[in-house]
Amino acid sequence: MQKLINVLAIASSVVSLSVVGGGVYLYTQKDAIIESVTEKALGSLGSLGGGLGGDLPIGSPDLAPPAGQAAAPSAGLGLPTPSSAL
């Protein structure tokens, strides 16, 4: 019975030391970890946004209204203004 208790005590000590060691490692390396994650996140956003560069038709002359029509006035959020309240 004493051998079993000793094994459990040693196992508990190993787990405790592992948790403390991991915490110390994370605390000392937190700046490098944050920098690495930030670079990876911004890198993935850059590759995503780069693919949309010339694909959006905003401001394209093909979408201009016909010569006889003017564009409808818009409200502050870019939404069309209603012509009548009712």
Image: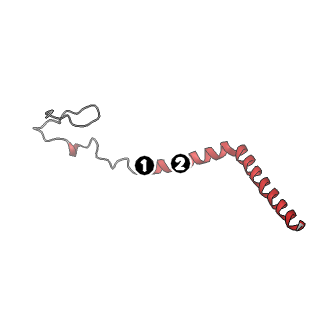
- Based on the displayed image, in which of its 4 quarters is residue 81 positioned? top left
**Residue 26 in the image: above or below residue 81:** below
- Based on the displayed image, in which of its 4 quarters is residue 71 positioned? top left
Q: Amino acid at mark 2?
A: Ala
Q: How many marks?
A: 2
Q: Position of residue 17 (x, y in %)?
A: 79, 53
Numbered label attached to residue 76: none
Horizontally, is 30 left or right of 15 in the view? left
Horizontally, is 39 left or right of 12 in the view? left
Which residue matches tag 2? 41
Q: Amino acid at mark 1?
A: Gly
Which residue matches tag 1? 50
Residue drawn at x 78%, y 54% as measured from the top left: 16
Estimate how packed mark 1 is, as few (under 14), some (14 to 19) or many (20 or more) residues with alpha carbons within 10 Å: few
The residue positioned farthest toward the left in the image shown: 68
Q: Real-space Cα distance between discs 1 and 2?
A: 14 Å
Q: Position of residue 67 (x, y in %)?
A: 12, 39
Estimate how packed mark 2 is, as few (under 14), some (14 to 19) or many (20 or more) residues with alpha carbons within 10 Å: few
Residue in the foreground of this view, choosing between 77 and 84: 84
**Residue 49 in the image: above or below residue 14:** above
Q: Quadrant of the N terminus?
A: bottom right
The residue positioned farthest toward the top in the image shown: 76
The residue positioned farthest toward the front in the image shown: 1
Q: Quadrant of the C terminus?
A: top left
Residue drawn at x 70%, y 47% as measured from the top left: 26
Of the two numbered discs 1 and 2 on the same chain, state the one appearing first in sequence: 2
Label 2 secondary element: helix
Residue in the foreground of this view, choosing between 18 and 9: 9
Residue drawn at x 82%, y 63% as measured from the top left: 8
Q: Position of residue 11 (x, y in %)?
A: 81, 61
